[in-house]
Image: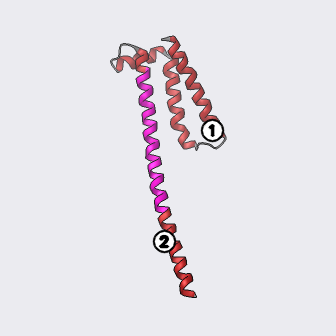
């Protein structure tokens, strides 16, 4: 169990550093980094606080605490992925609407040019 918790803590710290470096280099926007940082901090807290992990396991009615860590990890990142799927879908819809508006403007400009000749 200790080895799994150590790996989880190390990966959580690595994720935190990666996200912070990405924000610093402007590869990820601050508002999107918050989800990743919150997820990584939650995993770090669970991996470094055995009593908290055991309490989470009891609350989930799981007898093996590392399994609770895996379950919580999966749920946290599924929520993050869902949030980003919603954001990506909205951006795609906005891009389609913008392309349609641009096409209409181009058509109007071309129509104006043909009428003025």
x and y, in percent, of residue 17 in the image: 62, 30
Q: Outermost residue toward the top?
A: 2
Magenta span has 83? yes
Main SS, magenta residues: helix
Query: At numbered mark 1, what does the secondary structure look like: helix, strand or loop?
Result: helix
x and y, in percent, of residue 99 in the image: 50, 63
Q: How is the image coloured?
A: secondary structure
Q: How many marks?
A: 2
**Rendered residue at 53%/86% (across/down):** 115
Q: Nearer the viewer, residue 56 or 95?
A: 95
x and y, in percent, of residue 82 in the image: 42, 40
Q: Which callout, 1 or 2, points to the residue nearer the camera?
A: 2
Residue 52 falls in image quadrant: top left
Q: Which residues are magenta?
A: 69-98
**Rendered residue at 41%/30% (across/down):** 75
Mark 1 and mark 2 lie on one chain; the one further toward the N terminus is 1
Residue that mark 2 sits on: 104
**Rendered residue at 51%/75% (across/down):** 107
Residue that mark 1 sits on: 22
* Alpha carbons under labels 1 and 2: distance apart: 37 Å
**Is 60 situated above or below 34?**
above
């Amino acid at each position: 169990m200790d080895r799994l918790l150590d790996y989880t803590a190390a990966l959580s710290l690595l994720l935190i550093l990666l996200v912070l470096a990405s924000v610093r280099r402007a590869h990820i926007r601050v508002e999107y980094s918050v989800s990743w940082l919150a997820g990584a901090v939650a995993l770090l807290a669970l991996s470094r606080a055995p009593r908290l992990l055991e309490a989470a396991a009891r609350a989930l009615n799981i007898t093996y605490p590392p399994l609770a860590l895996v379950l919580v990890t999966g749920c946290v990142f599924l929520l993050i992925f869902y949030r980003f799927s919603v954001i990506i879908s909205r951006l795609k819809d906005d891009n389609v609407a913008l392309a349609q508006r641009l096409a209409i403007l181009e058509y109007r400009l071309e129509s104006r040019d043909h009428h003025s000749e």
